[in-house]
Image: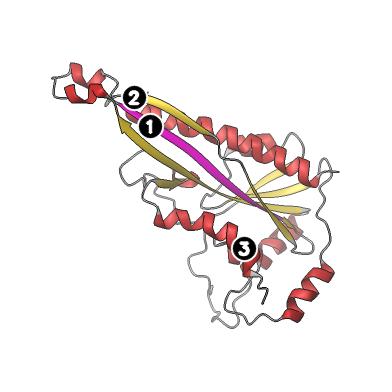
Amino acid sequence: MTDISTKLRPLGLALLMLTIAGCTRSISNSGYGADHQPNPFYKGELEAYDVLGVDPSQQITDADIKAANITRAPITLRKGSAIMLVQSGAAFADQPMVDDLSRYYDVSSFSGVPLPDKRFCGHDDATAPSYSKLLRLAAAKGGFDAIIVYWGVLESATEGLGTKAVSWVPIIGGVIPDETQHLRIRVMLAVIDAHTGQWTSLQVAPPDDTAISNDHSRAASDQRQVELLKTAAYHAATELVVAKFSR
């Protein structure tokens, strides 16, 4: 039987990498370090089901799916449309993403920090307000036409160079390039109609970069790669949104 979770599977698989892969880090917590946890304000990621208004515990029937298909209408964004931009896990969307989308739309950043308790104060599971409706209510009060929520992960792999064998040389060894880092970024977007709650997901083709570094330059090299890839991915994401939704 067809299940609405089928549509969410690609998005769910991408987000799953945030928790199960040892060589990934969120774009909202992308600092350099062994545990990639330098951001004291990082509280985790928004859950796709919460954002998109799908309750995975709810019984879903063929009638529900049929009704959703009947009421669905294309999402369109005119040039200058007001967009509420949300970066999962961050208090504010990264400025390069805001700047890129602002070339076409009226963009305002909104918090993507998860709420401390999905049940919220004074509500139990049965009466808790829908997080997706909270987003849409905030968008309605702000006069926004659409909400764009995006998630991203950085995936890295390293390989030692032959020069790493001389890393025992005092002082001098530290400045010899001894490691290559391969880094790529995966960005997924959910474009949500603020009026109807209908949504479409997009995935950016992952840009990648390779850099050689030594002990002294490792952190700086890593962060240069991160910023380079974020900028490339955000530009590609903007072009995808414009091509898909702007008529």
Q: Is residue 124 magenta?
A: no
Pick the quarter of the image with the N terminus. bottom right
Task: Indicate the colouring scheme.
Answer: secondary structure
| Vertical placement of residue 194 versus 119, above or below | above
Residue placed most toward the observer, 241 or 128 = 241
Residue at position x 57%, y 78% from top? 57
Secondary structure mainly formed by the magenta segment: strand
SS state under label 1? strand
Give the residue type at disc 3: Leu
Residue placed most toward the observer, 178 or 103 = 178
Instruction: Give the quarter of the image for residue 135.
Output: bottom right
* Horizontal arrangement in the rendering, residue 115 relative to residue 167 (left or right): right
Stretch of the chain drawn in magenta:
179-191
| Vertical placement of residue 80 versus 225, above or below | below
Residue designated by label 3: 8
Distance Cα–Cα, label 1 vs label 3 = 32 Å
Residue at position x 74%, y 64% from top? 197
* Horizontal arrangement in the rendering, residue 154 relative to residue 179 (left or right): right
Residue placed most toward the observer, 80 or 229 = 229
Earlier-in-chain disc, 2 versus 3: 3
Give the residue type at disc 1: Gln
Residue 213 is tagged as: 2
Residue 181 is tagged as: 1
Residue placed most toward the observer, 61 or 41 = 61
Rendered location of residue 9, percent (x, y): 59, 62
Give the residue type at disc 2: Ser
